[in-house]
Amino acid sequence: MGVPDRPDSLEAEPLKLAAKHFPLPCSLHELIESRYAAEATAASGAVALTVGEVLDYLSNWEDLSLNPLQSVLAQAEAAGDAGRPTAAHAALLLWLGTAFTEWERTFALEAPLATELRRLKPLAARQALVDPDFLVPGRHPLHQLLDNLQQASVGWQARLARAGQACHRLVTGTVGDALAVAGPDQQQALEELNERTRAAMQRDESRVQRMTQRMIEAERGKIRTVKAKRQAAEMINAVLKKYPAPPAIGKFLKGAWYDSAQLVLLKFGADSDEWRQVTTTTDTLLDSVQVAADGKGRQHLFELVTHLPRQLKHWLFSLQHDSDAVDDAIGVVEFAHLKLLRNQPMETEWIAPLPVADTAPTAARGDIPEAVREGQWFRLELGSGEPLRAKLALRMNDEKQLLFANQAGIKVLQRSFGDFADMAAQGKVSLLLCGASFSRALAAAAGVRSTEDLDGTLGAEAARARQEQERRELEEANRARQQHLAAEAARRAKEEQQAGDSRRQEMKKAELPMGAWLGFHDTEPPLMAKLAVHDREQNTYIFVDRNGIKLRQLNREQLHALMDEGMVDILEKRSSFREQVKLRVQGRDD
């Protein structure tokens, strides 16, 4: 098969009918006879060949570059046979020859698979003469078989080597099986062969989709990581522009806090409440070291000292695996606050910003049309060697990048929108069409290339059938969407339940240190209390308020039951905040 007529077009779709329009609602018999009447009559003669004689000539067809009528006439002439096909038979053979030419030009494949599929031309010609179903594009099993084989082969190239062996075996094996079909049950045998071919294609497609999806997820992960790095840096830099800070605070922000901010973005996204809290906490931290420790400023600082370290600790995702590292990081902040409270001098400076990579979306230079969609196959001339056949696996509109995969689902090319548009303008890009390809070529050979042709030629019956089909497809799409939404909701609910169970189990395993603050939600209003006594022998937990007054007493089973019901929050696991600050400051002063 050759190359499409318009290799420079990103939207070349010469046959406007789509796979969903097949099979057509009625036979093209009358259209075929009227369209090819003059040429068919000229090819017929006084002596008519019987259908059996024409079939025999088609069985001995050797030069497959000829159309079927040319082959029959050439063989008859070589044999000295004065007979000619009837005008009706000649019209069918001309129609099929035109369809094959259209198919091989518009739905081009690489050799040798293109040559292998051409071996089915004699079988198709014989079926056109003897089976009325063959005149309804998309209905006959041989139509469907050729449709499927072309779709399976559109991305095949010899350069795939071992990765393309499965497709090569599928095509050659299926063609051989089809040519071996004979006898009165030929159509049923073709239907069974078609089912086996479809099943094999689905298995291969599932495997390729898994490979492609892994590749897409990896690429999206890279994009999210780069974007999170940039956004986190921009957020921290914006705060650093507003305030000077102690060098130790700057080091904390550009180290553990920067890493943690990226993780929050990756987990929750830039539009989440979590990210807004991180942004607010960052601003609050820098603001806190500007506060004068006198009058209202001192009272404000006391409030920050009480709450800010807990907020910082909550969002230090990058250090969650190392409690000592968390304490060290928070200690830097606590030390700065303590110096302010003691009215000790605080050295501050304007902290240099974090480097920000230029990862913002590029200008829409040479933008590409929306018709360039994921899942489409393209033939790309890259300047060296044979052109590349690749499928658009991912269209990244924000980043203006296109990611291409080969038939095995492996990444083979990435291009910006601008570079791809330049390639198209230079004629180095052509859209490779597939989907009901042979059925569409049969319809086009009869003059039916669009839904307007279909409605105008075949009348209201065809329009009604098509509209009914589209209505059913819409209903099916809506039903599938509802099922998908329901499945997603069930999945999220299950994940939330599992996460809640996991949190409760972790809480039940935790050894609560003396002085840990817990929030109890089984009372009205909720109660906040500190663990003052844990007597393992007596199986007793005693909780007090800030003044040491006993608030409640629970045994292990009661505490675990409240945890299972989600009625307990562990607010602070460390011992006395003031004691730790005092010890840390004493250690540094010494």
Image (tube, rainbow, N blue to C red):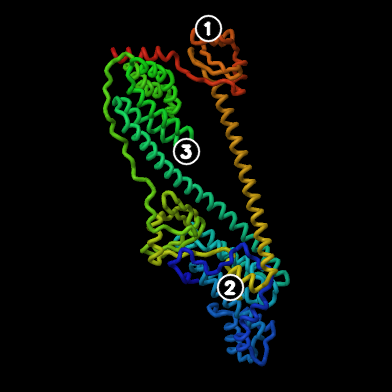
Please name the amino acid that badge 3 sits on: Asp
| Picture residue at 67% right of the left edge, 77% below the top | 29
Residue 162 can be seen in this image: no
Q: Are marks 1 and 2 in contact (CB under 8 Å)?
A: no
Which comes sooner in the sequence, label 1 or label 2? 2
Q: Is residue 462 above or below residue 275?
A: below
**Which of the two discs, 1 and 2, sits closer to the camera?**
1
| Picture residue at 28% right of the left edge, 33% below the top | 352
The kind of secondary structure element at disc 2 is helix
The kind of secondary structure element at disc 3 is loop
Q: Which residue is mark 3?
A: 271
The kind of secondary structure element at disc 1 is loop
Where does the image place residue 458, in percent across and percent down from the top left?
66, 72
Where does the image place residue 221, in percent across and percent down from the top left?
45, 43
Q: Taking 415 as reference, is 494 left or right?
A: right
| Picture residue at 64% right of the left edge, 78% below the top | 32
Q: Which mark is residue 444?
A: 2
Seen from the viewer's position, the closer of residues 391 and 210 is 391
